[in-house]
Image (cartoon, rainbow, N blue to C red):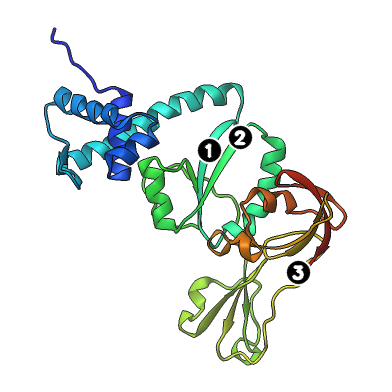
């Protein structure tokens, strides 16, 4: 019986890192090895399978067409190997270890502030890495192993994946009385002429309102007693210094301008808290003195 020599996971990790970074030096740094070790590992892999995966020049690292396909396959193999460890950990401690989740922007700021504090409280061994992405990019990441799960709006063709329905997001319709004198309790989406609609999203609800409507739709009132997405919060640190932050999306966050991403540790410590409560803010404790 002939002996088949298989690539090692380490060799496949080198290949995937090189694909991601496009540079031997950066790929080696990502794998915590020297550049010579990285280069030798790729050459050993090419020798083992008998094909050229990467074309090397002084300035450019270019994958061959076969190299591209093998790198994609290697990514899936590595993810499957990681799942072996995940399965073993989950058997003893559910929701422990690392989990990477992608969330679409229309859900993230409204849902995450409510579920993240409970996750931290109930599953302290879970290390959750969040990424805000469009639906297509999130599904692509799910298939190539960059993310473990996605939170998105259905229906969407995300390929062969296991899906669980979490909740229905209610939509409210506003229109002139003359347009529909006796409206039913439930209006089907197919009955709405989407050519005459404006979409408006606020903190809690989505309103669909006709351009012909004379009524004015205003934002749902915000409860300023607790910190939530969009809140402006003033805290006083132990040394007496006062800081004011506004909690915003990841793309808007700039601590130098007083805006914090809602997924930042400080923002998450503040979420759901009230005036007078003391929280961990960076390396010290701070008291919440104002919320608006």
Instruction: Count neighbours of disc 2 (C-alpha within 10 A) and say few if under 14, some if 14 to 19, many if 20 or more.
Output: some
Q: Which mark is first along the chain, 2 or 1?
A: 1
> Image quadrant for the C terminus?
bottom right
Q: What separation in Å lies between label 1 and label 3 (alpha carbons)?
A: 32 Å
In the image, residue 155 above or below residue 190:
above
Residue at 65% x, 87% y: name it.
181
Read off the residue under disc 2. 126
Instruction: Count neighbours of disc 3 (C-alpha within 10 A) and say few if under 14, some if 14 to 19, many if 20 or more.
Output: some
Q: Which mark is first along the chain, 2 or 3?
A: 2
Q: What separation in Å lies between label 3 and label 2 (alpha carbons)?
A: 31 Å
Instruction: Count neighbours of disc 1 (C-alpha within 10 A) and say few if under 14, some if 14 to 19, many if 20 or more.
Output: some
Q: Closest to the observer: 107 or 263?
A: 263
Per the image, label 1 sits on a secondary structure element best described as strand
Asked whether disc 1 touches disc 2, contact meaning CB atoms under 8 Å apart, the reply is: yes
Asked whether disc 3 touches disc 2, contact meaning CB atoms under 8 Å apart, the reply is: no
**Picture quadrant where residue 68 is located:** top left
Percent position of residue 134, x then y: 44, 59
Q: Is residue 269 left or right of residue 140?
A: right
In the image, residue 198 above or below residue 229:
below
Read off the residue under disc 1. 99
> Image quadrant for the N terminus?
top left
Q: Is residue 156 visible?
A: no
In the image, residue 230 above or below residue 48:
below
Q: Which mark is first along the chain, 3 or 1?
A: 1
Q: Closest to the observer: 241 or 271?
A: 241
Residue at 17% x, 44% y: name it.
58
**Picture quadrant where residue 222 is located:** bottom right
Read off the residue under disc 3. 222
Residue at 48% x, 57% y: name it.
154
């Amino acid at each position: 019986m002939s002996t088949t020599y298989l690539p090692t996971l380490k060799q496949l990790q080198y290949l995937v890192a090189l694909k991601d970074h496009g540079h031997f030096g950066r790929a080696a740094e990502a794998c915590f090895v020297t550049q010579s070790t990285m280069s030798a590992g790729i050459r050993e892999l090419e020798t083992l399978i008998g094909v050229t995966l990467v074309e090397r020049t002084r300035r450019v690292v270019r994958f061959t067409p076969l190299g591209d396909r093998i790198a994609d396959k290697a990514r899936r193999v590595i993810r499957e190997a990681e799942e072996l460890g995940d399965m073993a950990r989950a058997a003893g401690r559910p929701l422990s270890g690392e989990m990477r989740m992608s969330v679409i922007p229309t859900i993230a700021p409204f849902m995450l502030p409510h579920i993240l504090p409970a996750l931290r409280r109930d599953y302290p061994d879970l290390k959750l890495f969040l990424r805000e992405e469009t639906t297509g990019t999130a599904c692509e990441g799910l298939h190539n192993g960059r993310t473990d799960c996605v939170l998105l709006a259905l229906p969407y063709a995300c390929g062969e994946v296991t899906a669980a329905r979490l909740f229905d997001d209610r939509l409210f319709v506003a229109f002139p009385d003359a347009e529909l004198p006796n409206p039913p309790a439930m209006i089907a989406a197919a009955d709405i002429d989407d050519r005459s609609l404006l979409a408006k999203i606020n903190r809690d609800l989505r309103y669909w309102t006709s351009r012909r409507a004379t009524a004015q739709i205003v934002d749902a009132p915000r409860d300023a007693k607790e910190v939530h997405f969009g809140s402006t919060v003033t805290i006083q640190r132990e040394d007496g210094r006062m800081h004011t932050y506004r909690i915003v999306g990841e793309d808007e966050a700039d601590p130098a301008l007083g805006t914090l991403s809602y997924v930042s540790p400080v923002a998450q410590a503040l979420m759901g808290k009230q005036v007078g409560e003391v929280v961990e803010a960076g390396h010290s404790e701070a008291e919440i003195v104002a919320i608006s």
